[in-house]
Amino acid sequence: SDDAVTSVENYKSQFHSAINLVDFIQNPLPPLPLKNEIHLHWLAVNGCQPLVHENPSTLIVRVEDQPTSLPKEMQQLCARITGIVLAVDEASSHSPALLAVYNVFASDAGLQPLVPYFSRFFYSQIKANCRRLPLLKTIIRCIGSLLRNGDVSLGFHLQQLLPAVFTCIVAARLSNSPAEDHWSLRR
């Protein structure tokens, strides 16, 4: 116990001793630190990582509709899914790759960062390919799969998804030929 009291008194005398201000002012100042010890930055803003040097590196793709602020793996997933969807035709509408895409949309919990890119992709493809019935059916089925995914919130993207869906329901003509079954898309 006496050792503890002596330690406390030594500590107090070491840091609380009287300082002569004249000597303190005449001594040179210590050098300034070169680096900040603590540096704060935003890791993510609205679900997207900003392209700053503190964040992990990302692959920058110079395509407008590609997710450039996402990790490389998510960019590859987005590119692969959009490639499979765009390659659809009447013969491949039930291909294993397309069924896997539907499964990813319906069950993958990590799709939320990609939802803005997919909703923009769906909207632009329906707008540009209003007469390509197999693609329209595939996109509507993808949107339906996304709606079934309980881990994905589509609330902020309805302004892009709903016009696309309504176009497929009320458009005057959705196919190149009147013989094509456009009613199956409208149901």
Image (tube, helix red, strand yellow):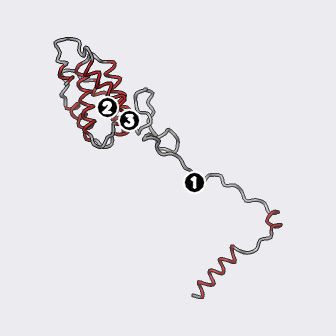
Residue at image x 23%, y 31%?
A: 97
Residue type, mark 2 in image: Arg
Report how many numbered discs are placed on residues in the image.
3
For marks 1 and 2, the one nearer the N-term is: 1
Give how far across and how far down residue 62 sits, in percent: 45, 27
Regarding mark 3 in the picture, which secondary structure is present there?
helix
Instruction: Give the labeled residue for mark 3.
Output: 156
Q: Amino acid at mark 1?
A: Ile
Q: Which mark is residue 80?
A: 2
The secondary structure type at the circle numbered 1 is: loop
Within 10 angstroms of label 1, few (less than 14), some, or many (20 or more) residues?
A: few
Residue under label 1, please give it.
38
**Residue found at x 66% / y 55%:** 33
Q: Position of residue 25 (x, y in %)?
A: 81, 63
Compared to residue 100, the image places residue 16 above or below, namely below
Residue 38 rendering spot, x and y as whole percentages? 57, 54
The image shows residue 186 at horizontal and vertical percentages of 21, 23
Q: Amino acid at mark 3?
A: Phe
